[in-house]
Amino acid sequence: MKVLITGITGFVGSHLAEYILGLDEGHEIYGICRWRSPKDNLEKIYDKVKLVETDLGDLSGLIRHFKAIRPDVIFHLAAQSYVLTSFNAPIHTLWTNVIGTANLLEAVRIVEIDPVIHICSSSEVYGQVGEADVPIRETCPFRPASPYAVSKVGEDMVAYQYFVSYGIRTIRTRMFTHTGPRRGDVFAMSAFAKQIAAAELKLKDPVIRVGNLQSVRTFCDVRDAVRAYWMLVNKCRPGEVYNIGGNRTLTIGEALNILLSYAKVPCDVQVDRQLLRPSDVTLQIPCIDKFSNETGWKPEIPFEKTLQDILDYWREELARRPWTALTITK
């Protein structure tokens, strides 16, 4: 089977490629990436995947590569995925996530191939929900509270439209909070862990800069998430949408306290107003019954292991590349 992953050099894409290769079933893995995309996340599997250089904004490039590869499965994971950045770059976020997805689906239509296509939407589409909406089901109304969330509503609906109009086999997921080693340092748990590791190595003062610690999230390990994605394209129905999420619900502050308990030096916590969003989503607890009933999937990795692995990842990264501590933003 030929599997193509957009965003293969990113956090989830690299873990997904590793997972599929680990199945040892002879699948060919192709990855779309831009010429400037860092390849660090593919360090362990670089010689086992085939990278093709193009951009989701380049329809002609997508057409050319799809004609050559003719993938059986496409995982569309590439996106501008940071909520706070979307407030500063709303047009870029909308263009990348909505037009990029439309280009990908239009290329599939033009080339006349018939892959199963996983379109990665987001739980952010649900916005700020009330207690009556928890746990959040797929039928919950959209209330996007950021340009990122709006872009994911657009991506979600474009995928549905191409299924309805052209029979293109899209399956949408609305993934709730997921984290793990290699997560970008602008995302909460990874940002906290990087700061702790930097403090342990005396690369910065032992002060952890944070945003809103009161938001409630249900956490999932990225390695459970990519296992779910593989089950999705093999067991789920095109045209449908599925919530996927973990089973450990905490506030961001409670999760931070677990991380701090692993620290080798005492650290203070300081709220940085620059890290507070103009509008925030503070309650995200998923109902994943639809997906679990169709696939049998359930999260397996304990949240404490997830956090320990993130911290160990940053300890190793900063020990071998101490200058990257200069990029700490949280």
Image (cartoon, rainbow, N blue to C red):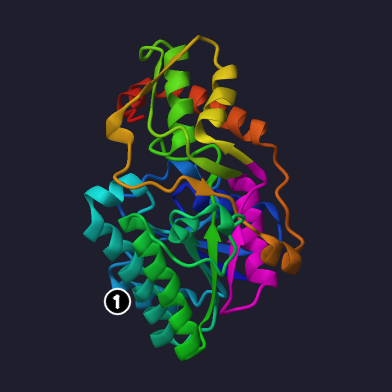
According to the picture, the residue beneath numbered tag 1 turns out to be 60
Vertical comparison of 254 with 173: above or below: above
Looking at the image, is 12 positioned above or below residue 320? below
Q: Residue at x 47, y 20 (%)?
A: 197
Which residues lie in the magenta part? 220-248
Question: Residue 225 in magenta?
Answer: yes
The image shows residue 80 at horizontal and vertical percentages of 35, 54
Name the residue located 47 percent from the left edge and 43 percent from the top edge.
41
Q: Is residue 71 left or right of residue 25?
A: left
Type of the residue with mark 1: Ser
Q: Position of residue 146 (x, y in %)?
A: 33, 54
Disc 1, SS: helix
Q: Residues within 10 Å of mark 1 (few under 14, many from 20)?
A: some
- In the rendered structure, the answer to whether residue 329 lies left or right of residue 266 reads left
User: Is residue 317 in sight in this rendering?
Assistant: no
Q: Residue at x 61, y 58 (%)?
A: 244
Residue in front for this viewpoint, 215 or 190: 215
Would you say residue 238 is visible in this rendering?
yes
Q: Position of residue 228 (x, y in %)?
A: 65, 58
Which quadrant of the rendered structure holds the N terminus?
bottom right
Q: Nearer the viewer, residue 139 or 154?
A: 139
- Let me know if residue 173 is in the magenta part: no
Residue sitting at x 36%, y 75%: 102
- Report the quarter where the C terminus lies: top left
